[in-house]
Image (cartoon, rainbow, N blue to C red):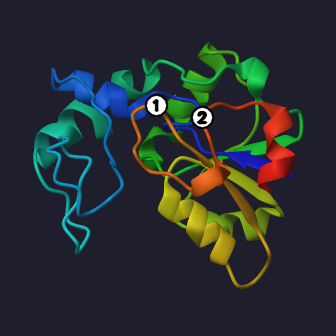
Amino acid sequence: RLALDIDDVLANFAEAVHQAFGKNIEPHDHWNPYESSGQLILSFEPQGTPTGLREEYLDKCEHNKDFWYNLEPISLPVDIPLETVCYITASPKNMVGVRIEWLKKHGFPTLPVIHSKNKALTMDRLGVDVLIDDKLATVQAVRAYEAKKLRAIHFKPWYSTQSDNTNSITRLYKPVYPRLI
């Protein structure tokens, strides 16, 4: 039983944020709190406090339904494995309805969309065995989850410098999963 993250696995979130601010996206580690590449608001202080253009980000992106609805896909519906049971996203909770509309707009399978900040716990509660996610810290947290042996695959968008050694994939394609999980 497989779950998929949406942003930066199915939807081109990071690139859209950069476009919203009139910036070209360059390869970076957007989930590393110590990254100093100046990549807009996608970096955080060690305490988790967002740096940079936080208020402008909230207006242009986080609270903007048009922003979420108009994201371009980076994966195709045809690549979604049949055994996928849901989408688990940490995107803003108030945007779940827009995420559902985005998935429909691009022809992705109609599956439950669950908002979660603790994806391992959510997987355990839903009986999901495997998660494909772009955030390496999430992948590691799922693998380390103590209550149950859960598996995770790291999805690496083209602009990410993060890597899970040989366990990163750059596109959804069913034949690569068995060697990673």
Disc 1 vs disc 2: Cβ atoms closer than 8 Å?
A: yes
Residue occupied by mark 1: 158
- Residue type, mark 1 in image: Trp
Q: Is residue 29 left or right of residue 4?
A: left
- Residue type, mark 2 in image: Thr
Which quadrant is home to the C terminus? bottom right
Question: The residue tagged with tag 2: helix, strand or loop?
Answer: loop
Q: Of 58 and 14, which appears nearest the observer? A: 14
How far across and how far down the image is residue 62, in percent? 31, 40
Q: Residue at x 34, y 27 (%)?
A: 15
Residue occupied by mark 2: 170
Quadrant of the rendered structure where residue 45 is?
Answer: bottom left
How far across and how far down the image is residue 101, in percent? 58, 24
From what the image shows, is residue 50 above or below residue 23?
Answer: below
State the mark number for residue 166.
none
Q: Residue at x 86, y 48 (%)?
A: 178
Callout 2: 10 Å neighbours few (<14), some, many (20+)? Answer: some
Q: Of 78 and 106, which appears nearest the observer? A: 78
Q: Residue at x 81, y 44 (%)?
A: 177
Q: Is residue 163 left or right of residue 153?
A: left
